[in-house]
Image: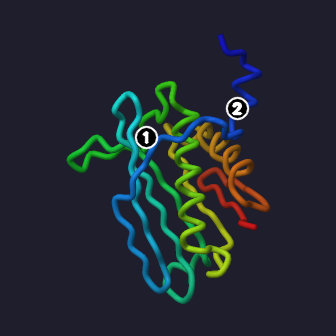
Amino acid sequence: MMKLKDILLEIGEGSAKPYQFRTVKDKPDNTDHNRQVSFKTEDNDQYQVELHAYWGDNWVTDTLGSHITIDFLIDHGFGNRDAYVVVNKGRLFRVMATVVQIAREFMKDIDYKEKGIDTLRIEPTKDDLDDHRRSGLYMAYIKRQLPVASVKYDGDEIVAKLK
């Protein structure tokens, strides 16, 4: 049986093996790029990861600056997608390792430094207004697995400054 200490050390450590994933949609443009990636767990849960990068002169950067957003959810098919479902079923570490790997590849592919993208934004889903469990988990992975200088959470959104 795994000890609680072992579990806590694993969070954000990233030793879990990512699932194989495939790009469903990849749309680059002059001032933005979006990509959709999917992967499936042993339980046949189909995950959808959506990444968006914004830079240059456009209405999004006028408001939020150059940044990347990441969102992931379970896709039940037929347009039935759920970001509020518990996203692990005992597969939490592999799911998070996969999302991190997808984010790393996206950041490399778009060459975020060259484009002046300096921020990562993620809005963790909540079961209620006081539910911040996912934000803590996401921040642990962001801090340990992605090139960030600082990470802040305002109760609604995680904002990480990229190195």
Q: Amino acid at mark 1?
A: Tyr
**Image position, residue 88 (x, y; %):** 49, 31
**Image position, residue 46 (x, y; %):** 35, 41
Q: Which residue is mark 1?
A: 84
**Image position, residue 154 (x, y; %):** 67, 55
Residue situated furthest top in the rendering = 1
The residue sitting at 43% across, 69% down in the picture is 34
Front-most of 154 and 33?
33
Residue 43 vertical placement versus 31 (above, below): above
Residue 10: which numbered mark, if any? 2
**Image position, residue 35 (x, y; %):** 42, 64
Front-most of 88 and 58?
88
What is the quadrant of residue 159 in the picture? bottom right
- Give the mark nearer the N terminus: 2 vs 1: 2
Q: Amino acid at mark 2?
A: Glu
Label 1's element?
A: loop
Label 2's element?
A: helix
The residue sitting at 55% across, 54% down in the picture is 123
How far apart in space, not on screen, are marks 2 and 1 (Cα)?
A: 23 Å
Q: Nearer the viewer, mark 2 or mark 1?
A: 2
Q: Is residue 2 left or right of residue 53?
A: right
The residue sitting at 73% across, 56% down in the picture is 152
Q: How many C-alpha atoms fall within 10 Å of the one at disc 1: few (<14), some, or many (≥20)? A: few
